[in-house]
Every structure is written in structure tokens, then in C-alpha cells.
């Protein structure tokens, strides 16, 4: 496993989704089917969005990785292990319909259901330029449970208008790797 | 009300407001609001969108920034009076910084304000107000943790 795999995973998933969204026309200004292009934030901080009274840019898509569980042995004696990373895409659309559209396309990209996107995403080693796929790990969404859910779960008095345009795609990214987790390369 | 008001002395008004702001500021100068400006980071290798390197061998240097940190007279209001309860916790660490127009011009473009040992990143400008020709700015800044 490469060193600092969580950041590599985050960047790899982000690159995969941005590439897909670009192909689908979301990154063009204007996209045509919306007023504003997507602003992709791979350093997303939900707390700051909430405390700051909403996103500063409409159609922001924020990527975060949740608590990382322990690696699980997949094959006794063979050394194959996996880690299931919880990944979240917070979508703050310019309106509710656009938020749903963006969410559906992200789900489609992650599930390989739109364009010719693959369900299998290489885990890139971004410490090198250009970033090659890490030889010892493969990130895959084979166990993908991408779901689009509503995010207006705040208490009533704080129910700002922007919350009603907030949707979340949840996604489990499984990284398979062979060998220990202590590599320093 | 915007625009000149007959008999209204803007400088006298600013002095009075600054006097009140100063009275409300912490006595310890180190605890008072200090505004910091963004610096440019240069790395010797690949970095992520926040400028943090991917490789442990990469080094990062920071320039001096466009301005040194600066203190101006302002008032700080805790904006977390009604923290937001969510399914995963309670959010709301934020402050509103109120500045008069002249002091706002000094700090505009700042990246974050350090106040009482904590860092608050600039988020957005709230609705501006004013009296006569004096503009009053309210800036929402979001907690980023210890400074």
C-alpha cells in the first residue's frame, strides 16, 4: 500500500468524478442545462459551510472522506486485504432540480452507468508527476452503494433556504491491496 | 441612511464608534483581533488543492504575503448564539466582525482573523449598513480551530 492512502483515494476519486462531470458538460460556463458550472471542492468542510451560512459558490460539489475503518483480510494466507472508505459528495445546487441532476450524474459516474466511465478507479500515486496508478493497490467501487439523499436535516429554526438545495451522494470505495500497510514509498 | 446628512460629522461619529469598540476589546493585546493576509506557497513537488505536498520529500516555502498582519479597531460578536444542531453534531463556531469603512479598507482581502487564540477564516460579507457617508461592514468569519 502506498503511504498516505486516504489522501490518494480522495484525490483519485475526485479526479475520476471531475473527469466524468467535465465530459458531461458540467464544468463548462454556463453548462447550458444550468446557470452555473460546478465548483468542485476537494477540501470540503461541512462545518464551515454550515457555520458560514451556506456555500460561497452555487453548484458547489464538496468531497469528503469519513472515518476510515481497519483493513480486513480477504484471503487467509494470501495477503490480500481491503479497506472500505466512506466517501461523501455534498451538493449545493443553484436550485433543487439542479442539485438532483448533479447528484444523479455523480451516482452514474461512480456506478459506471453514464458515458463509458468505469466502476474501477485506479488509486493514483500523486507524489509523482504525472501520477501513475499505484502498483500495489486498486480502488474499486465494485461494492458501490452510491445513494442520493436529502440533506435538510437541520433543526427548524436554522432551516435556511440553501439547505433545501443540498443533497448528498454517499459512496463506499473499497481499496484492495496486497501486503502490509507500512510502505513508505 | 446613505449619503450626506446635514449637521452630521462623520469623523466624530467614527471616533465615537471606535471608542465603544475599544472599550469592548480584550485588555490583553495578544488576544485582540489580528488580521492575516494570504501568502503564496511554493513547493518542490506535487501538492494538493490546499498546497500540502503528497510526497514526504517535498518542501514548501511561504512568501511574506502582500501585507503584514494588522490590528484595527473592530467589534467581535459571537455568531454562534443559535448553534445549528445536525444529525452528526452541533455546528456554529463563527463570529461577526464589524468594521467602519476606513478600517475595512485596511483589512479587505484578509484570509483570516486571529481572536483570543483562535483562527476564524473569512467567509462572507453580510449585509452592509451605514450612517450618512460612513459605511459599516459586517464580516462573517468561521472558526478554524486553534491559532
Image: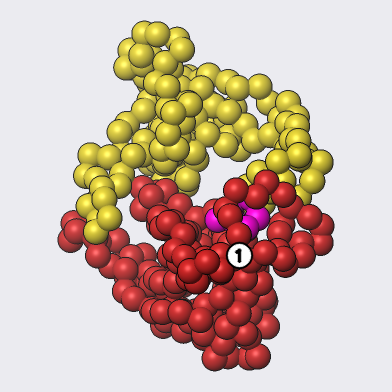
Q: Which chain is rendered red in the image?
A: A
- On the question of residue A58 being in view, the answer is no
Residue at 49%, 30% (x, y): give it: B113
How was the colour assigned to the protein in this rendering? by chain
Q: Position of residue A160 (x, y in %)?
A: 29, 61
Q: Residue furthest left?
A: A156
Q: Position of residue A80 (x, y in %)?
A: 55, 68
The residue identified by callout 1 is A178
The majority secondary structure of the magenta stretch comes to loop
The disc numbered 1 marks a residue on which chain? A
Q: How many marks?
A: 1
Q: Nearer the viewer, residue B98 or A155?
A: A155
Q: In the rendered view, does A149 fall on the left or right side of A91? A: left
Residue at 21%, 44% (x, y): give it: B82
Residue at 48%, 26% (x, y): give it: B147
Label 1: which secondary element: strand
Residue B127 vs A125, above or below: the answer is above
Q: In the rendered view, does B62 fall on the left or right side of A166? A: right
Q: Nearer the viewer, residue B88 or B34?
A: B88
Q: Which residues are magenta?
A: A1-6
Residue A71 vs B58, above or below: the answer is below
Q: In which quadrant of the rendered view does residue A109 lie?
A: bottom right
Q: Which chain is rendered yellow in the image?
A: B
Q: In the rendered view, does A97 fall on the left or right side of A136? A: left
Amino acid at each position: 500500500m502506498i503511504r498516505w492512502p486516504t489522501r490518494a483515494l480522495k484525490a483519485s476519486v475526485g479526479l475520476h468524478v471531475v473527469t466524468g462531470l467535465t465530459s458531461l458538460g458540467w464544468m463548462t460556463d454556463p453548462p447550458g442545462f444550468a446557470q452555473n458550472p460546478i465548483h468542485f471542492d476537494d477540501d470540503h468542510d461541512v462545518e464551515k459551510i454550515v457555520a458560514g451560512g451556506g456555500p460561497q459558490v452555487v453548484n458547489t460539489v464538496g468531497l469528503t472522506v469519513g472515518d476510515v475503518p481497519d483493513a480486513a483480510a480477504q484471503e487467509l494466507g494470501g495477503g490480500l486485504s481491503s479497506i472500505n472508505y466512506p466517501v461523501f459528495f455534498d451538493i449545493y445546487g443553484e436550485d433543487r432540480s439542479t442539485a438532483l441532476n448533479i447528484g444523479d450524474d455523480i451516482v452514474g459516474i461512480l456506478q459506471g452507468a453514464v458515458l463509458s466511465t468505469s466502476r474501477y478507479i485506479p488509486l493514483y500515486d500523486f507524489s509523482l508527476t504525472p501520477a501513475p496508478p499505484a502498483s500495489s493497490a486498486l480502488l474499486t467501487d465494485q461494492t458501490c452503494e452510491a445513494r442520493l439523499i436529502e440533506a435538510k436535516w437541520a433543526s427548524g429554526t436554522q432551516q435556511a433556504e440553501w439547505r433545501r438545495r443540498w443533497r448528498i451522494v454517499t459512496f463506499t470505495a473499497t481499496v484492495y491491496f496486497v501486503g502490509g500497510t507500512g510502505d513508505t514509498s | 441612511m446613505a449619503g450626506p446628512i446635514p449637521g452630521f460629522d462623520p469623523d466624530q461619529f467614527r471616533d465615537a464608534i471606535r471608542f465603544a469598540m475599544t472599550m469592548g476589546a480584550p485588555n490583553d493585546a495578544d488576544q485582540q483581533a489580528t488580521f492575516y493576509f494570504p501568502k503564496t506557497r511554493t513547493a518542490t513537488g506535487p501538492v494538493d488543492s490546499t498546497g500540502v505536498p503528497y510526497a514526504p520529500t517535498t518542501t514548501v516555502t511561504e512568501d511574506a504575503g502582500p501585507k503584514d498582519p494588522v490590528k484595527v479597531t473592530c467589534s467581535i460578536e459571537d455568531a454562534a448564539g443559535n448553534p445549528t444542531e445536525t444529525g452528526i453534531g452541533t455546528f456554529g463556531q463563527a463570529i461577526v466582525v464589524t468594521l467602519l469603512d476606513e478600517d475595512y479598507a485596511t483589512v479587505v482581502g484578509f484570509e483570516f482573523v486571529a481572536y483570543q487564540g483562535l483562527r476564524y477564516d473569512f467567509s462572507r460579507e453580510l449585509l452592509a449598513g451605514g450612517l450618512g457617508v460612513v459605511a459599516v461592514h459586517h464580516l462573517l468569519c468561521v472558526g478554524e480551530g486553534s491559532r
